[in-house]
Image: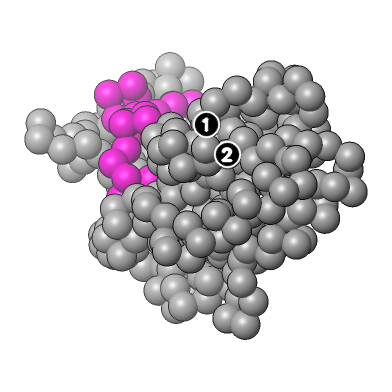
Amino acid sequence: MKAEVDNIVSESQSLFGEINAKIITTDSEPKVTEVAEGIQDVNSNVTDVSGAKIYELPNQIVPKKVENFSDEELLAMLLENGTEEKRLSVSKDLLSAHGEKFSFLFRKNESDLIQYRTTVGDYAAKRIAVVSEIIKRVLRENINFSEPVTSSPKVFDLVREMAFLSQEELWLLILNSQNQCQEIIKLTKGTIDRSLFDVSLILSNVLRRGVKRFVVVHNHPGGTSLPSREDNDATDRLLNSCKTLGLALLDHLIVFGPRDTDYYSYSDDGKLW
């Protein structure tokens, strides 16, 4: 029995030596697929008498931690078609097509991702859409409705998920007398034959709730940071109507990205007075 165990140990050490020689280098990280193949070779040859595996992955060939992956490597983990090199190439192309930003890519919904399915695979397209939805739900979980909305950063905290919308939308934030957000209403989506800003719809929703303070927010999915002429004209019309009705438009925010500074505020720019 001792001789059998000695033979097993000797064989395993030899196999691990071959694995290390193939996949451990001084100038690059081991590839996950190569590590998996190497360990499968060991497990297929080195077992105890009951068939159980007796050797685990050695510390020196554990793949690097996820937080150390490049953007291309992270995205490649979601893809399914082709070799590791092919997936890395595709992920690089996807990021390049979206301004090297995850936020642009993850604005895509399932229907938007159809164009990529022949490249990344059906399940990969679904996974990208799932990640996008998870991001939005995490952002919703961090919303603090009890905190007064006293500045543009406070408004942005409430609507940051708009940075991941694939279509232009207009949201209405209803505030109470203490400037706490009571409700977020998703009013309209941009279409070819309908203006995003329906001033009468905005005002009717405010008046129906018996409040005087509110904020409007819309997004620029293309990442444009400045308001358009149409944005300015609609804001002027809304502001003039508010003055007539005794309502307070506290801000109009345009969201164009997920970072803390990725928005434009009409209030901060002095255009609501």
Q: Residues within 10 Å of mark 2 (few under 14, many from 20)?
A: many
Given residues 258 and 89, the one toward you in this image is 258
Task: Give the CA separation, mark 1 to mark 2.
Answer: 8 Å
- Residue 73 at what x, y percent from top left? 32, 47
Q: Is residue 129 magenta?
A: no
Asked if one can make out residue 36 in the rendered structure from this viewpoint, the answer is no
Magenta residues, start to end: 52-75
The answer to the question of whether label 1 and label 2 lie on touching residues, with beta carbons closer than 8 A, is yes
Q: Residues within 10 Å of mark 1 (few under 14, many from 20)?
A: some
Q: How is the image coloured?
A: one colour
Q: SS class of the residue under badge 2?
A: strand
Q: How many numbered markers are drawn?
A: 2
Numbered tag placed on residue 152 in the rendering: 1
The part of the image, by quadrant, that contains residue 192 is bottom right
Numbered tag placed on residue 211 in the rendering: none
Please tell me whether residue 268 is drawn above or below residue 163 in the rendered image.
above
Given residues 168 and 174, the one toward you in this image is 174
* Residue type at the position of mark 1: Ser
The part of the image, by quadrant, that contains residue 189 is bottom right
- Residue at left 77%, top 53%? 203
- Residue 15 at what x, y percent from top left? 28, 36
Given residues 208 and 189, the one toward you in this image is 208
Numbered tag placed on residue 251 in the rendering: 2
Asked if one can make out residue 23 in the rendered structure from this viewpoint, the answer is yes
- Residue 271 at what x, y percent from top left? 46, 42
